[in-house]
Image: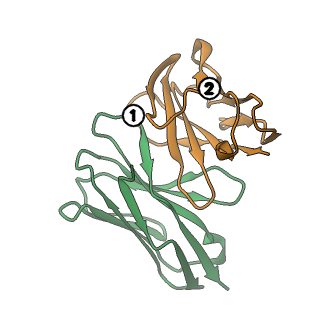
Amino acid sequence: QQQVKQSPQSLIVQKGGISIINCAYENTAFDYFPWYQQFPGKGPALLIAIRPDVSEKKEGRFTISFNKSAKQFSLHIMDSQPGDSATYFCAASGGGGFKTIFGAGTRLFVKA
Amino acid sequence: DTGVSQDPRHKITKRGQNVTFRCDPISEHNRLYWYRQTLGQGPEFLTYFQNEAQLEKSRLLSDRFSAERPKGSFSTLEIQRTEQGDSAMYLCASSLNQGSEKLFFGSGTQLSVL
């Protein structure tokens, strides 16, 4: 039961470029939308998160854009660096449930 | 804050054997989650504890899987009669009791069933 769909599966970006990862959800009861970053051999770590009452949130080089009517949200990584090379997961939670539902992930490679 | 700790990091077992994993959450966190992650996929929810109470269990979870959290502290996940399809990374996460959905993950236990 995939309630969060993520694209693309993989992404190659030049150093200094913008990385964009997209996510779509189905359950309109979700009220918390995080992005997690995972390096090989490590568990996911929260990068940035947004609630549906705002359309954009920015933290440093990372920005979430949220479109409630389209049930979509995206992660933008500005000035991408080789150290950003990792797998990124969008996720969603809320609606009275306890669990967080994850997308399938996007493997980002930033070329130096 | 010493982070979420999982043990062992790696486990190799033969098909049909039982295995048990341990998770020590961040001390003040009341919520504890188990997820399973296979190669190229996102974490898949298995079960959730609020203190010592197991409040939700995935319908996809086989009866061979059982989890406990005695006294609301550490948690164990046991897989009985392991199958090759159980090979995956088993992740534990914890979070604060209320008002925070932020999950703190451990580094996981990588299970290989031969």
State the image coordinates of residue A24 (x, y, percent, origin top left). 33, 62
State the image coordinates of residue A8 (x, y, percent, origin top left). 46, 74
State the image coordinates of residue A72 (x, y, percent, origin top left). 29, 64
Amino acid under disc 1: Phe
Query: Which residue matches tag 2?
Result: B27
- Between A35 and B111, which is closer to the camera in this rendering? B111
Q: Which chain is green?
A: A
Gap in angstroms between the C-alphas marked 2 and 1? 20 Å
Query: Which label was assigned to residue A98?
Result: 1
Residue at image location 50% in from the left, 31% down from the top: B47
Asked where in the image residue B25 lies, by quadrant, the reply is top right
The answer to whether residue A42 of the structure is visible from this angle is yes
Amino acid under disc 2: Ser
State the image coordinates of residue A32 (x, y, percent, origin top left). 34, 48
The answer to whether residue B95 of the structure is visible from this angle is no
Q: Callout 2: 10 Å neighbours few (<14), some, many (20+)? A: some
Q: Which chain is orange?
A: B
Q: Is residue B62 left or right of residue B114?
A: left
Q: In this view, does B84 lie to the left or right of A35?
A: right
